[in-house]
Amino acid sequence: MSQGAKDLVSSLLTVDPAKLCTSAGVFESEWYKADPAALQLHIPHFSDNMRKYNLRRKFKGAVLGIMANRRMSAMFLAKPNLAPPKVEKPEVAA
């Protein structure tokens, strides 16, 4: 594996958000620019499309979570016997 590839991978695995390599940074890396075939495969709006995709995916997950929560709430409100039984603590004689 080349040193440029190692540098790129290590910058992608960085925990510090300030030093983390972005998708635009990948396309600007020396390792990526060194391969002429890779430059021809680059989709110009990849970064924007990926961000929009992730936003839609997160929004869909939030909507599905809210729908599941509402279904569960309705199920427990409609059938009160599904609620966990209350357990009374026995009194301890001192």
Image (cartoon, grey):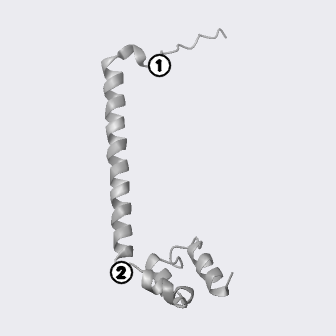
Three-letter amino acid code at disc 1?
A: Pro
* 10 Å crowding of disc 1: few (<14), some (14-19), many (20+): few
Label 1 SS:
loop
Which of the 4 image quarters holds residue 74?
top left
Q: Find residue 75 and report its horizontal and vertical position in percent.
A: 34, 24
Placement of 4 over or under 73, stated as above or below:
below
Marker disc for residue 44:
2
Nearer to us in this view, 52 or 75: 52
At 36% across and 23% down in the image, what residue appears? 76
Q: Earlier in the sequence, mark 2 or mark 1?
A: 2
* 10 Å crowding of disc 2: few (<14), some (14-19), many (20+): few
Q: Find residue 49 and report its horizontal and vertical position in percent.
A: 34, 70
Q: Find residue 31 and report its horizontal and vertical position in percent.
A: 57, 87
Q: Which residue is labeled 1 in the image?
A: 84
Instruction: Kindly report the distance in space between the C-alpha atoms of the residues bearing marks 2 and 1.
Output: 55 Å
Marker disc for residue 14:
none
Quadrant in the picture for the N terminus: bottom right
Kindly report which numbered mark, 2 or 1, lies closer to the viewer in this rendering.
Answer: 2
At 35% across and 43% down in the image, what residue appears? 64
Marks 2 and 1 in Cβ contact (< 8 Å):
no
Residue situated furthest top in the rendering: 93
Placement of 59 over or under 41, stated as above or below:
above
Three-letter amino acid code at disc 2?
A: Pro
Label 2 SS:
loop
